[in-house]
Image (cartoon, rainbow, N blue to C red):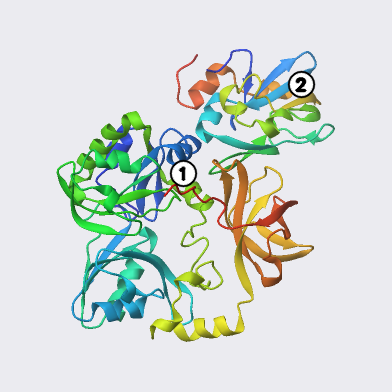
Amino acid sequence: MYPQDLRYSSEHEWARVEGRQVRVGITKFAAEKLTDVVFVDLPKKGVKVKYMQPFGVVESVKAVSDLYAPISGTVVDSNTKLLDAPEVVNTDPYGEGWMILVQPEDPKELDTLMTADQYATMIGESGS
Amino acid sequence: MAINQLKRTSLYDVHVAAGARMVEFGGWDMPVQYSGIVDEHRAVRSAAGLFDVSHMGEFEVAGPGALESVQRLITNDAAKLAVGQVLYSPMCTPSGGIIDDVTVFRLGEARFLFIVNASTTAKDLAWIEEHVRDAETVDRSSEFALLALQGPRAQRILQRLTQMDLSDLRHFHTVPDVGVADVRCLVSRTGYTGEDGFEIAPPWDEAPQVWEALMEAGRREGLVPVGLGARDTLRLEAGYMLYGNDIDETTSPLEAPLGWTVKLEKGPFIGREILLAQKERGVSRKLVGFEMTERAIPRHGYPLRVGDDEVGRVTSGTFGPWLNKSIGMGYVPKASTRIGTPLDVDIRGKAVRATVVKFPFYRRATGV
């Protein structure tokens, strides 16, 4: 459920280091809580995001939820496929359902995020 | 007992066992969804869904003055109802605002049943009692549970559990004493989804038996339990008003698309004078339906703009799971009500373009 190679925020975003960049999405737990994701609003390339500040929103039929950046930096890519197929966030949250790719300002921020086991404990599930 | 203790319907345990996600609604602990709003919504449009709406209130008004009392309370014309017929109507204040929107069942010549919204039950009861003359008002809310079986396969499913020939029960008609799975129920061909369907009122404690029998009878037909989440998206697509969102004491039925329920010629009723004046002068704003030109979702309370002017607020909005579009409704000035009129919805500070469209958004194809 919670891949070991990711870091997790208390707001249910994951961060994956890919070379010098960091890919960001929301966890399976968050996707299931939202159930049917029907709209995702993401920043465009070049926009700056700040650590634990809202960078976009994800909407289910019923609710609007803010997305929080698990790392500060510049958006170098955003998953425009989600505009037409937001349900991918539910079906493949760690793969095709990624949201933004960030060029970090301070990679050390990642150290403040949770490991998979810490995250599983926080949401009340036993470690992977 | 805690002050904010939520009320439970007799189906509470059934919902929890079925894995429902429960939420507070109008003081009740109700299922918002089971498998997911989108799945449940599509099941109702294509097969059938079963809803627990036992939280709604039921009041009976009976006695020699019953018809006259009902006529005073509602804007629609109860005199036109034969015994066994049902109508939908607002109840208005003297200033033409809407106290609640209700369905009225004529159970006998001098016997009527009001089905009212859960969140307004206490207010409605006080209002009805205050205005009834020469008839008795009885709160029967705790006697009746209420299930809604909705969708194109509803008749086929219900028919398996009853002797009555359901093809004899026409839209907006009711039969008081139908055996459903060996339970005596008040059954009507009514609903809040835009589909064919029934509302079934068994005695409060016998609802689980009726629910389980319906689920069993409908299993092969694709019947699923449906929560309040999909109930809202279904009614929104079908253009039904939600009390407290789209209509309330500050809106008139002539501003809402409820002019068809205001029968000014029927004789005196509460609110008639002002509604007559509104009709003659014309209202300055009307509720319209609009469609977003992109996928962004309008939500209750978001500002509606024409050019730079804020002209109103979104009263209801959602992503319509069947229409596959973001839709909403809200009050706009008369000049902006024509189909095709561009509006902007302020979504998180960004103006997103919408267009006024034909209302309701969804109408089922009627085969007969």
- The amino acid type, in three-letter code, at marker 2 is Pro
Question: Is A36 rendered above or below residue A27?
Answer: below
Q: Dot 2: what SS?
A: helix
User: Which chain does the residue under circle 2 lie in?
Assistant: A
Return the mark for residue B124.
Answer: none
Q: In this view, does B308 lie to the left or right of B159?
A: right
Q: What residue sits right under mark 1 in the picture?
A: B230
Q: In the shown orientation, is residue B360 left or right of residue B183?
A: right
Outermost residue toward the front in this view: B368
Label 1 SS? helix
Q: Where is residue A42 in the image (x, y as percent from the top left)?
A: 72, 36
Near mark 1 (Cα within 10 A), the count class, few <14, some 14-19 or many ≥20, is: many
Alpha carbon of mark 2 to alpha carbon of mark 1: how far? 43 Å
Relative to residue B163, is residue B4 depicted above or below? below
Residue sitting nearer the eye, B279 or A4? B279
Q: Position of residue A117 (x, y in %)?
A: 53, 17
